Amino acid sequence: MNSKANDIDYQQHAQEHRDLFQDSDSPFIQERPSSYGALACISTFLCFCPVGLAALFYSCRARFAKDEGNFAEARTLGRNARDIAVASLILGIFLILVAVLIVVLLWQTVGFKRPLQ
């Protein structure tokens, strides 16, 4: 009797949480995979755009796979989007630092001269 009550409580708990899904290969309820859409957008618009577009592409594909119920593919595509977005962030920060370093070095060698009045 007690195990039946626990089973009913478990089923009610699972129905209450919309962020959970049951994978067809597994009898366990798991968390829905993330598509990392926000991270992909940030890396596209604020960092290195070409690599960020690839992250955005994988994020959209992960979202579509999740909507179709293919959670294993959504998980894989979401991880790809996350990894590419992180690479875009790192590359963007690196390029910004290199640009700042070049400007500082040029500033020191050429110097800033005011035009004569």
Image (tube, grey):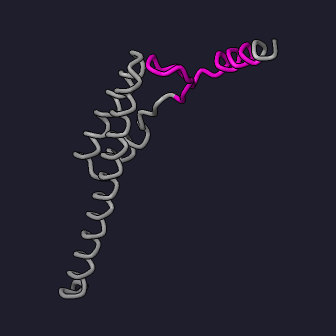
Tell me which residue sits at (39%, 32%) in the image.
Answer: 75
Split into 4 quadrants, where in the image is the N terminus?
top right
Total count of labels? 0
Give left or right: position of 67 versus 91: right
Q: Is 98 placed above or below 18 here? A: below
Q: Is residue 84 magenta?
A: no
Residue 18: image location, x then y, percent: 59, 20
Q: Is 108 placed above or below 13 here? A: below
Tell me which residue sits at (25%, 69%) in the image.
Answer: 99
Give left or right: position of 70 versus 1: left
Q: Nearer the viewer, residue 28 or 50?
A: 28
Which residue, as the protein is rendered here, is positioned at the far left? 110
Q: Identify the image quadrant of residue 5.
A: top right
Q: Identify the image quadrant of residue 106.
A: bottom left
Q: Does the magenta stretch include residue 15?
A: yes
Q: Identify the image quadrant of residue 96.
A: bottom left
Q: Which of 15 and 39 is in front in this view?
A: 15
Magenta stretch bounds:
6-31
Which residue, as the protein is rendered here, is positioned at the far right? 1
Residue 104: image location, x then y, percent: 27, 79
Split into 4 quadrants, where in the image is the C terminus?
bottom left
Give left or right: position of 54 versus 41: left
Q: Is 112 placed above or below 90 here? A: below
Residue 116: image location, x then y, percent: 21, 87
